[in-house]
Amino acid sequence: MEAPTEAPVRTLPAPIVAARAARTERRLLSGELRPHPNLFKYYALQSLLLGPLFWTILIPLYFRYHTMRFRFDEEGVSMRWGILFRREIALTYARIQDIHLSSNFVERWLGLAKVQVQTASGNSGAEMTIEGFQDFEEVRDFLYSRMRGAREGGRRSVPHAAAAGVEGGPDELAATLREVTRELRAVREALAARRGGEG
């Protein structure tokens, strides 16, 4: 009896993946974006769970859907919504710590998911929830690439900034570090000799 074989994992060729990423980036960076109409359908279905009181939640969700706007730029992402009480959340890519996708059965049926963006602010929940996009995986991948780019850019600039702070440049910095290493070694040897003399 033959062992069952696993279905091969289908991966797209690199040029197709790169073309999709470029198309998503152009679309996201093109200006203000509105959520997909399926988001309001989700809100309506969600409010029907309250039974006869569904209007109490549907009205605020209606205004949230119609005023919700997202903007992705070179520095970060922002989200705003509201009529009477206007709310806006803006995050730079460098502040993003983690990104999660979540969706329930109804969201999957409507082709939606929530992209939850977390920062190091100490909140247990997401700092920003991007919802209403049917290409949510591309949005997540775009945010990941920008987050990694912001971190790598920051890491590359640190050694140059440290070297610029020392008068002689990188050579002077290396000499200073060697001197500090010699002094630490001498302190460690003195402590070891002192412990040996006490024992």
Image (cartoon, grey):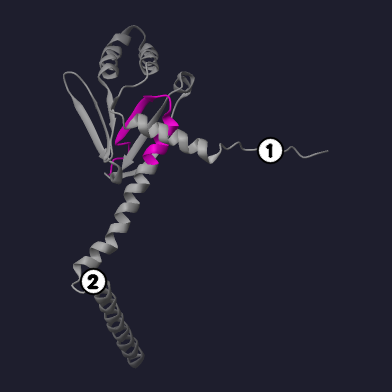
The amino acid sitting under disc 1 is Glu
Occupied quadrant, residue 8:
top right
Q: Residues within 10 Å of mark 1 (few under 14, many from 20)?
A: few
For the residue labelled by badge 2, is the local secondary structure a helix, a strand or a loop? loop
Please tell me whether mark 1 or mark 2 is closer to you in this view.
2
Residue identifier under label 2: 169
- Count the labels in the image: 2
Occupied quadrant, residue 116:
top left
Where is residue 87 shown, x and y percent of the image?
20, 27
Where is residue 155 shown, x and y percent of the image?
32, 57
Q: Residue placed at 45% from the left, 18% from the top?
A: 110
Residue identifier under label 1: 6
Q: Judge whether residue 100 can be spotted in this image.
A: no
Q: Looking at this view, name the residue that lies furthest to the left.
A: 84
- The answer to if 22 sits in the magenta stretch is no
144, above or below 183, in the image: above
Q: Earlier in the sequence, mark 1 or mark 2?
A: 1
- Tell which of 135 and 198 is nearer to you: 135
For the N terminus, the image quarter is top right
Distance from Cα at disc 1 to Cα at disc 2: 57 Å
Q: Residue placed at 31% from the left, 32% from the top?
A: 29
CB contact under 8 Å: marks 1 and 2: no
- The answer to if 125 sits in the magenta stretch is yes
Where is residue 174 shown, x and y percent of the image?
29, 75
For the C terminus, the image quarter is bottom left
Region of the chain picked out in magenta, as a range? 122-144
74, above or below 180, in the image: above
For the residue labelled by badge 1, is the local secondary structure a helix, a strand or a loop? loop
